[in-house]
Structure formats: C-alpha cells, structure tokens
Amino acid sequence: MQRIFNDNITLEHLMRLAQQGDRQAYARIFQEITPLLRSFVGKKLSRREDAEDVVQEILISIHNASHTYDTDRPFKTWMFTIARYRLSDHLRIIYSKRKKGADVSIDDEAYQLSNDENVTKIYENREYLSKIMRSLSRKQRKIVTMMKIEGYSVQETAHAMNMSESAVKVSAHRAYKILALKASEIVEEE
Amino acid sequence: MDTEQLIQNMIDDGPRKPLPHPMKQTMFWVIGTVLFLATLSGYLGLRGDIAEKFSEPSYFIEILSLFGLGVSSALAAFCLSRPDGHQMPWLKFVPFGFVVAWAIAAFSGSTAEINMVGLFHAMTLGRFDCIWHILLFSLLPGLALFLIVRKGATIQCCWAGTMATLSATSFGYSLMRFLEQNDNPAHLIVWHALPIVLICMVGMVIGKFALKWR
C-alpha cells in the first residue's frame, strides 16, 4: 500500500526510515532529489543526454554510498558532495578526450560561461568566446576556464593556481566584469 | 535504461546497511591495535628503565601525545571514508596539533643536543633496524585500517591514506619508545621520525590508488 508522507518531512528523516528498511521512504528520497540533481547538473552541462547520464551516475553513487550517510548530518551536503565529485569526473573525462583531440562540443563551454554572467546570450560560439577571453590576462583566463568551463571549485582552482581562495574570487569577479564590458562593446560595434 | 527504471531498480535493492559511527570504528580499531602491540611488547620485553621513564613528565607527555596522534588520525581516516568527510573538514588537521605537542615534549628539553653534527653522526650509525621495527609493528594495524576505510566511499583518498598511515605508524613509534632504551634526540629524529614522514608519503600514494572510490 502506498504510504503518504507529510510534505514537511525532511530528507534526513526519510533516509533514517530508509536505512531501517522502509522502501517507500527510499523511493520518496529519489523522487525528491532527482529534480534537484537535474537542476544542478543542467547548470553545468547543456546537452540533455549528457546531463541525464550524469544524473544517473550520481543517483547510482548515492545509492552505492547510502551506507556512509550519517542521519545526524545534513543530507543535502552529503548528496551534493557526491554530485560534485561525479560531475568533476565527467568533466575530467571530457577534457582529457579533448586533449587527445576528440570532438567535444563547444556548446557546453559557451553555455557554462553564459550561466553566471549572461554575456553570451547572443553569441554562443567558439569564435566569440575566444574573442572576449583574449581581453583577459593569462591568469584570469585560466581562472575563468577552470571555474566556468572545467567545473573546478574555487578551492580546487586556488590550489591549482597556488593562490588563496579569496584572491581567486576577486580575480574571477574582475574577469567577469571585463568579459561583460567586452561583450557589451562587441554588441555596440555590431 | 531510463532514469525512472534505474531508480526503481535501486529502490528494489534498498539502501545499504549504514557503517558504524566513525567514533565507534576508531574505538574498536584502537582497542585492537593496543591489544596487538601489548602482546608484542610482552613477547619482546619492555626497556629496563620503563618505570623510571614514566616518572619523567616529558616522556609521559610524549607517549600521551603519540596516543592522541594515533587516535585522532584514525578518527580522521574513518571520517574521510565518508564522501563528505563526516562534514568535519577540520578534523584532518587535528593530528598535526598532536605532532607539535609530541615534538615539544620529546625535544624541548634537549635542544642543545640537536645540531647538524649530531644528526649527521646519527645518520652514519645506520640504524635501519628501527625503521624495520616501526614498519613491522605498524603493518597489521595499518592493513586493518586501510581495509576498514576502503569499505566507505572515500573522495579525499590521499588524505585518508596519509591519516591511516600516520595513525598506524604513530602506534608503532609508541611501541618503539617502550622497547628501545635510546633517548638520543638525533637518533629519534633520524631513525624514527623521518622514516615515519616517508612512510606517510608512501601511505598517501597507496591511498590514492587503494582507497579511491570508483
């Protein structure tokens, strides 16, 4: 018999019930988290099929790691850590393929950059991206590429660049401003 | 397979049985390790001046710091076996506090004896047996620790490997301090502490491959 859960029931409580063997609570968890994961992955990957594949990988990982969740800790923090890890894995594979010369869609790159700064609403192609990216210093270009194209976190970028996290944030913020300015100049020129 | 079908399959499987709390895992592992080392020390025999040494506060604090180091790094390793590090990212830095406490307790009273000549002299003595003993004492507890950590889903595998190795070797080091009647600080640095640093680096590499969650 289908059990009705209260709308205010938390994911932590559902997981507690699931770990005690309640299959309906487990089903409800997947019902609740799948849209969250689709939205999370959709922000990073433009191709629907790729995004759905990654969502499936994350769901499998959550299922496989269900024994590591402590119900006294926030569920979403645990879930998004796994989601980020799997997404990074996916992006790493894409970019290692690209390094080897395989065909990778530029749409993903353009789409990812457009998410935060809304600078590529009109022009979503490599030429446009290259043009505006040239307006950045080498360091800023690397930070934007790592954070917005390759999907690294601020912490990982800071580590790779040997900079502090706050310095990365400041540098990225300045880079976005320059990109926005450059984009508006191009629009005016045209 | 579409996502709905996949979810249905996972629901049919049901969630896996939760791991014991990291504190509980640490407690069991520490008890096991202490019993193992106590058996070894009973077999090998304690140093002759052990009762006298325990009356020295610096020796007592050194042993306490080593115990704290072993316990805190084991706890950090168990927490790191969870993808979210049990949501306590600071925990992996706690053992370094114990390292500082140990260094102060072990060497603050003998800073004059720690110089390049002394260290070089200690190096020429070639006491590789100390390294082998520490390795031997740490091997079984370390193996057990790695196997338990592997049951989780480790994302920070290098950190987990380092913490697991640090914990096992710090217990091995403690046992050496109970057995070996040599308190020369240069000897302790060259043939005890530095090898542990190297072993931890090896542990980090092992962790990267052996603990990686796929």
Image (cartoon, rainbow, N blue to C red):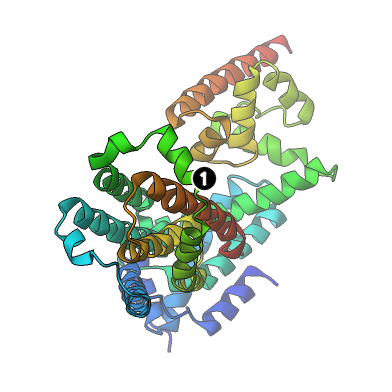
Task: Point out the residue furthest to the bottom here.
Answer: A1
Position in image of residue B173 (x %, y %): 38, 60
Residue carrying label 1:
B124
**Picture quarter with the C terminus of chain A:** top right
- Give the residue displayed 39% in from the left and 72% down from the top: A15
Under mark 1, the amino acid is Thr
Position in image of residue A43 (x %, y %): 58, 45
Above or below A144: residue B31: below
Position in image of residue A91 (x %, y %): 67, 48
Above or below A90: residue B5: below
Task: Point out the residue furthest to the top here.
Answer: A189
Position in image of residue B110 (x %, y %): 27, 40
Q: Nearer the viewer, residue B145 or B190?
A: B190
- Give the residue displayed 45% in from the left and 52% down from the top: B191
Q: Quadrant of residue A55?
A: bottom right
- Give the residue displayed 79% in from the left and 42% down from the top: A98
Task: Read off the chain for label 1.
Answer: B
Q: Nearer the viewer, residue B202 or B28?
A: B202
